[in-house]
Amino acid sequence: MKLFTKEEIEKVIRLDNRVVAVVEEAFNDLVQKKVQMPPIMRIDVPEHNGEIDIKSAYVAGYDSFAVKLSSGFFDNDKRGLPSASGMMLLLNSETGIPKAVLADNGYLTEVRTAAAGAVAARHLARENIKTVGVIGTGAQARLQVKALKLVRGFDKLLVYGRTPEKTAQYQKDMLQDLDIDVEIVSSPEEVVTESDVVITTTPSTEPLIQAEWFHPGLHITAMGSDAEHKQELESSVLERADYVVCDVKAQSLRLGEMRSCNDQRVIDEAIELGEITAGNKQGRINENQITVCDLTGTGVQDTAIARFAYDRLTE
Amino acid sequence: MKLFTKEEIEKVIRLDNRVVAVVEEAFNDLVQKKVQMPPIMRIDVPEHNGEIDIKSAYVAGYDSFAVKLSSGFFDNDKRGLPSASGMMLLLNSETGIPKAVLADNGYLTEVRTAAAGAVAARHLARENIKTVGVIGTGAQARLQVKALKLVRGFDKLLVYGRTPEKTAQYQKDMLQDLDIDVEIVSSPEEVVTESDVVITTTPSTEPLIQAEWFHPGLHITAMGSDAEHKQELESSVLERADYVVCDVKAQSLRLGEMRSCNDQRVIDEAIELGEITAGNKQGRINENQITVCDLTGTGVQDTAIARFAYDRLTE
């Protein structure tokens, strides 16, 4: 069994179009192949405000698959440590024998999560957009915007964050990294009313976005909620959107934005991203549609990026 | 993060009284401490007759805990490979950051599983026994008997196995390893009627042991069933035993021998091994009691042995 460090993995895996294609293929697999994807295993560590999630997916026909641990320990910043860490294990599908430990410290999860946002936007955002709005100022608030840049051109970024210092740092960093305007705004409402595409990236437990702020052509990707107590979108957002998409419906109903939806019609009509990427369902059909995509994070994405990383690391 | 190989781990961890004490302490923890032990996560790989189980347990107050992968790929013997493999990951309880990969290839699971059998026998088998019977001829059929030797003296071992060559090899190996008689018998019935302690170690999907063969003072440890389709004991065995014990009741009801029990009284009265080790309930109370213990394997055992191994490896 081989162990690869984060430094080694960062050298071969970047958030680029190849990774977006790999993650898009993973969503296809969910629809087109036999996939064994058990419910997420969660271990709570209440004494230290921590949680570990374990995800996995075996895709029939692939010679390996991943088991992924990701942790969030929310007292870590008091110690000067990042709250997220984790690793991926790659197992031989024919023998069950471990092939590799990808000690990526959460890096591959960050990349595959951002890539899923790009996949959603590719199929659901308008072709021509000018302004992107982001809520949150953490790692995904950065990576989701960079991933979107791979599939859509835009020249303005609005950001709303709760902590002024973090928001200012975000503005500074993004101005440096991307050749676009970056403006700080004072409310989620301002983000939504002035943006063509909105990305929510927070661990919020209270809804941040209201359907009242909708305007024609809006696309929202909500990637923050991945647990029973989290919620970024008011339930009316799903009810009043024209098109509701999620990564895995069962998971969105348990851990994502669909959990707070009381309208059975919305739940019944919501479709999975893989149905669009595989061509079974349409993406956006006109300039005026209001589209929402809820991403909770899936084991097939982990298996896809772990396999891709292993191939790059050993080629 | 450190990676330790099976060879390194085997040097510091052996099936001995220290390990039995560590596993007994883990059963105490289940009763005496706050434990977060989520249901087992299972990934099926039907194309290759394989399955991966993931177990974990966080015990409040301990500075680390384990996540354990164990795989059973039952076509592996056609390739000359063992069906079982796996590894343990040790995580820092305060930060969630991985401390170590114990690439033990299933070794620690074998040891902690056998140690649990010794813990059960220590509390449930008669003090003075002469004959031990084992059903099955695999790794656990060997280790369970060796673990029992740590807590009870006996001078005769009976074995029943389905495959004559494997049974003959078992006899040969055990004669070499232990200073006792080892006899091959021709049926599970013969094992039960002639033994004081019986250990079942098979992946059987059909019950092997019948209550009709009971005799006063018998103790049975059934450690084979750990999945919805497995069963070693006829349901009447639990109904007619005087005392039914299991490692974790919820798990035995889902994956172990209690799954096939239709008698609610038996389920209600069954107790967990930790209640006995912690002194809240009695073990065997007389020479004539017929006792049964069902072991499905628990995350606290994994956390206990992983922590113990890490301490030995880094001291």
Image (cartoon, coloured by chain):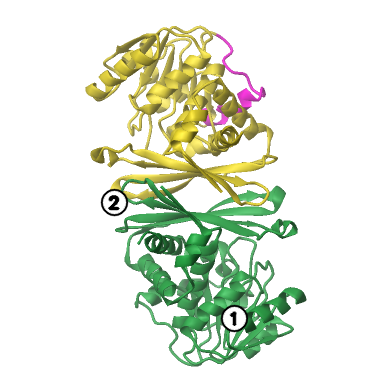
Chain colours: A yellow, B green
Spatial CA span between label 2 and label 1: 46 Å
Residue B85 sits above or below residue A131 on the image: below
Please name the residue shown 52% across and 24% down the image: A244
Q: In the depicted view, which residue is nearer to us: B8 or A203?
A: B8
- Secondary structure beneath label 2: helix
> What quarter of the picture does the C terminus of chain B occupy?
bottom left
Subunit bearing disc 1 = B
Q: Residue A291: horizontal and vertical position, in percent?
A: 50, 18
Say whether residue B15 is magenta. no
Which mark is on residue B177?
1
> Which residue is label 2 attached to?
A47
Q: Residue A250: horizontal and vertical position, in percent?
A: 53, 38
Q: Residue B221: horizontal and vertical position, in percent?
A: 55, 77
Q: Kindly report which numbered mark, 2 or 1, lies closer to the viewer in this rendering.
A: 1
Kindly indicate the quadrant of the structure image that contains residue B146.
bottom right
- Secondary structure beneath label 1: helix
Please name the residue shown 51% across and 9% down the image: A288
Q: Which residues are magenta?
A: A266-286
